[in-house]
Image: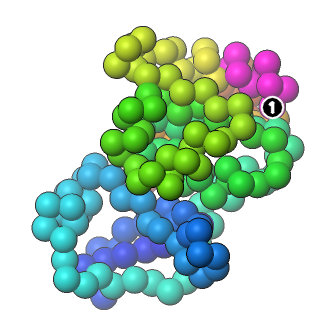
């Protein structure tokens, strides 16, 4: 699920992944990375209050349930929207392209625990081995895992490359539209 926040009730709403809290429903955390002006502003100058929309909405990660076996490829904080899927009982294979130390610096410990406990997790520390050929790796993981689909969460260019590379090979692949 995703939630929306804004500094102003009537404009400039931004959506972020909601990760279930350990205290049970309706507890959750919102994962925010300093990528754009809005998020950098939240981190460098935290507001005293934020407006929230009470209605949560499903995003691309909710589509993972439509497939029996799927590959999830995430770069950096892109793993956050899929954390709620980590506890699901259907088979998933996750690939996070940021090393354990990078994830540990970026996410709180309880989130890291969720990432590291993911079955069939592949972590690649790009500072040590460089950036892999993600479309090729997606196709190889798709075939070796016997997956039905590939879900991607990366930057706009990385997402486009992986999704289009998979589709050229006849592999169902999905990523965010990046149209907002």
Magenta segment, principal secondary structure?
A: helix
Name the residue carrying label 1: 147
Residue 37 lies in what quarter of the image? bottom left
User: 175 left or right of 75?
Assistant: right
**Color style of the picture:** rainbow
Q: Residue at x 64, y 32 (%)?
A: 121
Which span of residues is magenta-colored? 139-147
Observer-nearest residue: 164 or 60? 60
Magenta-colored stretch includes residue 92: no
Q: Is residue 164 visible?
A: no
Name the residue rendered at 58%, 20% in the picture.
Answer: 135
Q: Quadrant of residue 150?
A: top right
Q: Is residue 40 left or right of residue 107?
A: left
User: Crowding at label 1, few (<14), some or many (≥20) Cα neighbours within 10 Å?
Assistant: many
Split into 4 quadrants, where in the image is the C terminus? bottom left
Residue 23 visible, this orientation: yes
For the point 54% across and 27% down, the residue is: 123
Q: Is residue 5 left or right of residue 38?
A: right
Quick check: 42 left or right of 146? Answer: left
Q: Which of 50/101 is in front?
A: 101
Rendered-image quadrant of the N terminus: bottom right
Tag 1 secondary structure? loop
Image coordinates for residue 11, horizontal then vertical, percent:
29, 80
Check the image and name the residue furthest to the top: 129
């Amino acid at each position: 699920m995703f939630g929306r926040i804004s500094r102003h009730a009537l404009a400039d709403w931004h959506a972020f992944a909601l990760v279930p809290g350990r205290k049970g429903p309706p507890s959750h955390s919102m994962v925010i990375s300093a990528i754009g002006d809005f998020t950098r502003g939240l981190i460098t100058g935290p507001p005293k209050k934020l407006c929230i929309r009470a209605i949560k909405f499903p995003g691309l990660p909710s589509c993972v349930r439509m497939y029996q076996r799927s590959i999830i490829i995430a770069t950096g904080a892109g793993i956050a929207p899929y954390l709620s899927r980590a506890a699901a009982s259907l088979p998933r294979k996750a690939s996070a392209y940021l090393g354990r130390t990078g994830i540990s610096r970026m996410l709180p410990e309880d989130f890291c625990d969720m990432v590291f406990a993911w079955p069939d997790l592949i972590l690649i520390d790009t500072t040590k081995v460089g950036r892999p050929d993600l479309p090729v790796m997606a196709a190889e993981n798709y075939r070796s895992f016997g997956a039905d689909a590939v879900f991607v969460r990366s930057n706009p260019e990385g997402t486009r490359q992986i999704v289009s590379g998979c589709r050229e090979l006849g592999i169902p692949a999905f990523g965010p539209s990046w149209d907002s």
